[in-house]
Image (cartoon, helix red, strand yellow):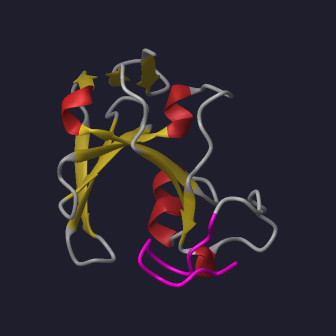
């Protein structure tokens, strides 16, 4: 199935024919700021399965693991379109909201629930980790 994600103005796009390897909801403060939402949701694809067009701007920060976390956004409209972590450089995390597809697959897990907004509810069948994916379950 072909999927296309893009920024608000359409200058930066990420296209794929593959199914996501994982969809992850994250409530860490960095993802909240990156997405402008109380939760950031990324769909992870093998790098070779994602074709990016346009000229995104890169912002690099240290991730929770200490590895660089690279955010790519549009310089025209500011939309965060995709991310890459040096921890797993073979994967590209495309912002699920950039697909604007209400039928997109739901998250396989939720991480950093220790900083999740109390009023934000996720389906009980989605495992929620206190911090990263290797941390204990929060619920």
In the image, residue 53 above or below residue 121: above
**Residue 31 percent location from the top left of the image:** 48, 61
Is residue 11 or residue 68 the one in the foreground? 68
Number of numbered markers: 0
In the image, residue 64 above or below residue 39: below
Which residue occupies 34% across, 19% down? 11
Q: Is 94 left or right of 31, judged from the image as shown?
A: left
**Residue 5 percent location from the top left of the image:** 44, 25
Which residue occupies 26% across, 46% down? 91
Which residue appears farthest toward the right when viewing the image? 119
In the image, residue 119 above or below residue 57: below
Screen quadrant of the C terminus: bottom right
**Residue 44 percent location from the top left of the image:** 38, 44
Is residue 65 or residue 37 the one in the foreground? 65
Which residue occupies 78% across, 62% down? 121
**Residue 63 percent location from the top left of the image:** 30, 71
Which residue occupies 62% across, 43% down? 106
Using the rendered view, name the quadrant where residue 118 is placed: bottom right
Please check the rendered image and state whether residue 92 is part of the magenta-colored stretch, yes or no: no
Q: Is 108 left or right of 56, judged from the image as shown?
A: right
Magenta-drawn segment: 127-139
Question: Main structural element of the magenta stretch: helix, strand or loop?
Answer: loop
């Amino acid at each position: 199935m072909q999927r296309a994600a893009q920024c608000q103005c359409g200058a930066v796009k990420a296209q794929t024919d593959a199914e996501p390897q994982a969809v992850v909801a994250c409530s860490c403060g960095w993802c909240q700021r990156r997405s402008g939402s109380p939760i950031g949701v990324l769909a992870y694809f093998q790098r070779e399965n994602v074709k990016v067009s346009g000229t995104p701007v890169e912002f690099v920060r240290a991730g929770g693991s200490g590895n660089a976390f690279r955010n790519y956004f549009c310089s025209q409209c500011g939309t965060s379109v995709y991310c890459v972590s040096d921890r797993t450089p073979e994967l590209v995390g495309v912002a699920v909201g950039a697909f604007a597809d209400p039928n997109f697959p739901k998250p396989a897990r939720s991480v950093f629930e220790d900083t999740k907004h109390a009023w934000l509810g996720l389906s009980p069948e989605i495992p929620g980790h206190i911090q990263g994916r290797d941390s204990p379950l929060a619920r």
